[in-house]
Image (tube, rainbow, N blue to C red):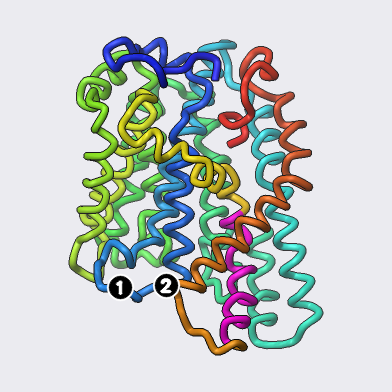
Amino acid sequence: MNRSAHSRPLASVSYSDYLATRTFGSLDGLRALAILGVLWYHTTNDLVFWPALNRGFLGVDFFFVISGFLIVTLLLRERRNSGAISLRNFYVRRSLRIFPAYWAMLLFVASVAFLKAGQESDAIKRDLPYALLYVSNMVPMASLLSITWSLSTEEQFYLVIPAFEKYVPRFFPLVLLPIAYIAACLPTFDLLPSVRMPVFFRQTTFGPILLGVMLAHVLDHPRGWSAAAFLLRSSLSPVIALAMVALALSYPGADISGWPRLAIHGSLAVLLAACVIRENHALAQVLSWWPIRRIGMVSYGIYLYHLVVYWPAAKLLGLIGVHSKFLLFALVVAGSWITAELSYRFLEQKFLMLKRRYSPFERPERYPAKFGQY
């Protein structure tokens, strides 16, 4: 990090410190919480009666909030530093970050599907074109490639929002962004019953991403940052925000569409804001603990590979007569983490080194890859 707020008293952390921060120290820890929630949901769903522990799928929504915030924060800082946003460099960076591991996963899954007959293989063959074209959030998916719906959502976000940031920098955050957020949230209230749309669109697919975009704009503006910093000035703010998240997740109804889901998104955005405004907060040590931080750093790979790991892990436990979902969760976490580390070490890192050539910051070699790596 070029300048760090870890060792500074809260009162001395300023807007200029925020703008100078190249690496948000808690983000990898927050990503780890999100990915562990997703893996917990896919391995132990409906195992416990506390509603919050059955809603790990909302870890994807948290990823969306983080993604919208980080991508737009990078774009806004690029414009501040250089006077313009380079869409070419943005798409090169995104391609080098996303495509290698994604296509490697698709190649492996497709190879197994074409070599081994069966219903799951047939489903994979049917779903593969949608995953390749990043439109799997628009059609029903019936195979392990169903997880690519979130990656399709991200790609569609990348195609639209950076262009608005570049070409209508004032009109977009003040007018288009609020309208887009409201439009993204309407389906979850069933206010458009006559409109046929994919199920993920009815679950506020783009809502949390746009919420992250709004947070990026608020914190990028000096008055917005000052207001947020005043409200979240306590070092306990992330703890309080995390309690808000837990409370929102504990909504007792089975259906969380509408206001309950928006409340969850809002609490997640508050948690993110509390962790990035300043670094020396009450959760900093936990979120920067090496295993948590490392899981967050390779969370993209863990998400990509976890269902590939799930099936052999479940079959192994079945063969030895063990039916513990907690053990299945542990095996999937370990196997996905190891696979993601191998992917990062032998595949992704090579492309990430190329990606830094297109950094929006001057002399990117001075800074850690973690911020730009996203």
Q: Are marks 2 and 1 in contact (CB under 8 Å)?
A: yes
Q: Is residue 228 visible?
A: yes
Picture residue at 65% right of the left edge, 87% below the top = 119
Q: Quadrant of residue 111?
A: bottom right
Q: Tell which of 356 and 314 is nearer to you.
A: 314
- Give the alpha-carbon distance from disc 2 to disc 1, as whole Å: 8 Å
Q: Tell which of 276 and 285 is nearer to you.
A: 285
Magenta stretch, overall SS: helix
Q: Residue 90 placed where, x, y %? A: 63, 30
Q: Tell which of 225 and 89 is nearer to you.
A: 225
Q: What span is colored magenta in the figure?
A: 302-318
Residue type at mark 1: give it: Val
Q: Secondary structure at mark 2?
A: helix
Picture residue at 57% right of the left edge, 86% below the top = 318
Picture residue at 78% right of the left edge, 39% below the top = 350
Q: Residue 139 placed where, x, y %? A: 53, 68
Q: Secondary structure at mark 1?
A: loop
Tag 2 residue? 44
Task: Examine the rendered structure and indicate whether residue 218 appears above or below residue 137.
Answer: above
Tag 1 residue? 48
Query: Is residue 323 a member of the stretch shown in magenta?
Result: no
